[in-house]
Each structure stands twice: as C-alpha cells, then as structure tokens.
Amino acid sequence: MKKYLTIFTAVSLFAFLSCEKSELNEINNERSPKETTELTECETAFGASDYCFSEDGFNRWGWVIGPLFESEEKTIHEIWAGAGRCMTENGALVGYLYVAYIDGVATITYDAEPGYIFTETHLYVGNDMYPLRRNGRPTVAPGQYPYSEPVNGRTQRYIVDDLRDEIYVIAHSVTCPSEKDEDDDNEPN
C-alpha cells in the first residue's frame, strides 16, 4: 500500500475540532495559565514536546514528538512560535496539534488559537526520529519534510497511512497574526 496524504479544509474539520476543543478545555482547566507573548509578525512555529532538536546537536530550534505507539488515545501538543532554543517563555502559544495514531494511520491536525492563522505547514511522520536527506544524514530543515502545504487559515489536517511500529512527528508551521474576527474561523479559505 502506497502512502497517501489527504488534506481537509476548515469546513470539513468543524465537527472534529469541536470535540477536540472540548477535550482541550478540560485539559486547560486543570493547568495553571501560562503568560505568553503575542505575535506581531509572522514567525516559525513547532508542535512542542519534551525533546528539543538541540539535544541531538542541531543548530535549529524545534521539537520531536515521540515515540508514539498505536493507541485509541489522541495526544495534544502546544504549538509555539518564536520560541528560540525551545524556550517557550520567549515565544507565543499560537495553537494546538492533535495527533491520533490508530491502525497504522496517523491523523495530525494543526489548530490555531483565535487571532492567528497558518500560512504554511510542514510535517514529518516516520519511524526514524528525523527525516533523512538524500545523502542519508538526518535533517530538521522544514523544507526537507515530506508533507508540505500552503494554507491561509486556522486549521490544517494531514492523514498519513501505511505506518508501523513506533513513529515520530515533527510539525512545523509559519504562523501569523490574523485580522479576522474569531467568528470567521470556520469559513472556507
């Protein structure tokens, strides 16, 4: 079976994200609020975890999510922009990344907070911790990730199949402040 990628628009995500947002509200109610800055211009952003690229000697900041094992449970990760050296206190919390890995299929959904939009997304999903360049060396450069889409909205979803065993995810985006009202977030782009 060949890997495929499906991208859904914000309209088709409305019902899915409504459930996820209620789950997220429960999680946020259990945590103490974090002070964050707000973006004034477009910034690079990554789905966060406990493992920063710099731990493996890379000069670029960002996080690797994983290893993830097949499960009926979704994982939810904050998306941080401008958090150089993986220091979230210097960045802006701009959204959440939802990852479901069930029966060899990974569904990854980027969801921006009100006031932000994604203009690009780049995604790596695989059995190795990092994607590999043609020369076989690992890379964290978002332009080298196998899945990439220009977007202009608050949500983006990827579905990657034909996966096995444990997987790793690196989710990058370019995130910008949005002029749109919060009520406009479910209109098609």
Image (tube, rainbow, N blue to C red):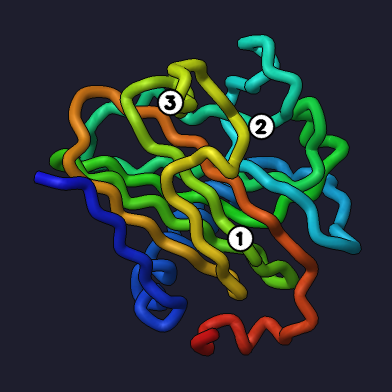
Instruction: Specify the quadrant of the image occupied by residue 182.
Output: bottom right
The amino acid pointed to by label 3 is: Gly
Observer-side mark, 1 or 2, equals 1
Which residue carries the number 1 mark? 120
Q: Are marks 2 and 3 in contact (CB under 8 Å)?
A: no
Residue 111 in the image, given as x and y percentages of width and height: 54, 61
**Left or right: 69 as drawn, with respect to 1:** right
On screen, residue 39 above or below 68: below
Q: Earlier in the sequence, mark 3 or mark 1?
A: 3
Residue 55 in the image, given as x and y percentages of width and height: 65, 11
Location of the C terminus by quadrant is bottom right
10 Å crowding of disc 3: few (<14), some (14-19), many (20+): some
10 Å crowding of disc 2: few (<14), some (14-19), many (20+): many
Q: Residue furthest front?
A: 135
The amino acid pointed to by label 1 is: Glu
Q: Mark 1 falls on what kind of element?
A: strand
Residue 6 in the image, given as x and y percentages of width and height: 30, 63
Residue drawn at 42 percent across, 44 percent down = 146
Q: Mark 3 falls on what kind of element?
A: strand
- Closer-to-camera residue (135/170): 135
Residue drawn at 42 percent across, 76 percent down = 9
Which residue carries the number 3 mark? 66
Which residue carries the number 2 mark? 62
